[in-house]
Each structure stands twice: as C-alpha cells, then as structure tokens.
Image (cartoon, rainbow, N blue to C red):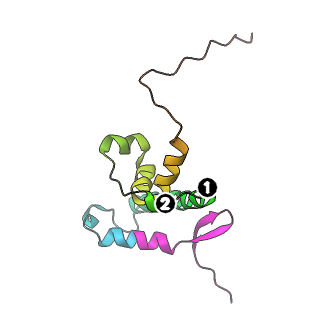
Amino acid sequence: MHTHEPLLGLLDGRPLPRAELDARLAALRAGPRASALPAPGTQQDRQLTRWVAQVLLSEELCAAEAAARGLDCATASPVHLDQRAAVELGSIAAAAFEGSAAVRAVYEAVTADVQVTEQPPAADPPRPSGN
C-alpha cells in the first residue's frame, strides 16, 4: 500500500508537506507564550492552525517568487514591526514579513517604485448614469 505524506498545499504543483506546519505549532506550544494558546482540539485551536498555515504558505509563495526574480534574500535583515505597521499589514502578512527574509525581499522588490505622499489619491470623475 502506498502512503502519502499529509500536505499543507501545492505551490506551482510542488507539494508542501504538512510537517513544517506541525513543527511550527509544536514550537509555539513549547514556547514562552504557550499558556496563552487555545487548548488543542478546540475551535480556536483550529483557527490558530489555519492562521499558521496561511503564514507558512505566504512564506513559501514569497520564497518561490524571490527565487524566480533572482532576489538575494541573504541581505534582508531581520525586522520587528511596530504595532501600527503590523496592523496596517494584517496579522498574517506581518508575521510572514517578520519571519521570512524572502517575504521582506519580495516586499522590497514590489514596492521599490511606490511613492507614498501625504496627498490623498485623486477622486475618479463621476460616471454618467446608465438610465
């Protein structure tokens, strides 16, 4: 009988084993904030598992994109976002950004030409109604 390793998902057809998700969850449960985590098997625990899975998938996607773009992830230094930046990015993106050099490298690459100004964007002109 042929057994298959449980999968987290597929990325461009490449299987992503669930083992990394299980390892991250185990590390959280063994970490300093373990007492704040939901009890195993509860609905909140399933939500935590989904959240960690989304962080991992974001990291894997950015690792693949960084490789495709030829980005040097070794130069992406570790960061810790302040609370406002984390809220602006969203919890999954913020966790992936903090935890993965590839995420930071891709972020830098795709935002390199973006200029943020204090001016609000121009409003679109009103559209004629189609009565």
Say which amino acid is labelled 2: Cys
The image quadrant where one finds the C terminus is top right
Left or right: 10 in relation to 117: right
Residue range of the region highlighted in magenta in the rendering: 2-24
Magenta span contains residue 14: yes
Q: Nearer the viewer, residue 34 or 108?
A: 108
Identify the residue at image location x=59%, y=56%. Answer: 65
Residue 118 position, x and y percent, is 41, 23
Quadrant of the rendering where the N terminus is positioned: bottom right
- Using the rendered view, name the quadrant where residue 51 is placed: bottom left
Q: Is residue 52 visible?
A: no
Pinpoint residue 3: horizontal percent, then vertical percent: 64, 84
Q: Amino acid at mark 1?
A: Arg
In the image, what residue occupies the spot 74% across and 12% down?
Answer: 130
Q: Residue at x 43, y 43 (%)?
A: 89
Dot label at residue 100: none
User: Could you say which is closer to the camera, residue 109 or residue 43?
Assistant: 109
Q: Position of residue 60 (x, y in %)?
A: 54, 62
Residue 52 percent coordinates (x, y): 44, 61
Q: Is residue 110 visible?
A: yes
Residue at 33% across, 66% down:
39
In this figure, which residue is indicated by the disc labeled 2? 73
Q: Residue furthest right?
A: 131
Q: Answer above or below: position of 29 versus 126.
A: below
Residue under pointer 1: 69
Disc 2 from disc 1: Cα separation: 11 Å
Q: Are marks 2 and 1 in contact (CB under 8 Å)?
A: no
Q: Quadrant of residue 98?
A: bottom left
Looking at the rendered structure, the secondary structure element under dot 1 is helix
Q: Tag 2: Cα neighbours inside 10 Å, few (<14), some, or many (≥20)?
A: some
SS type, badge 2? helix
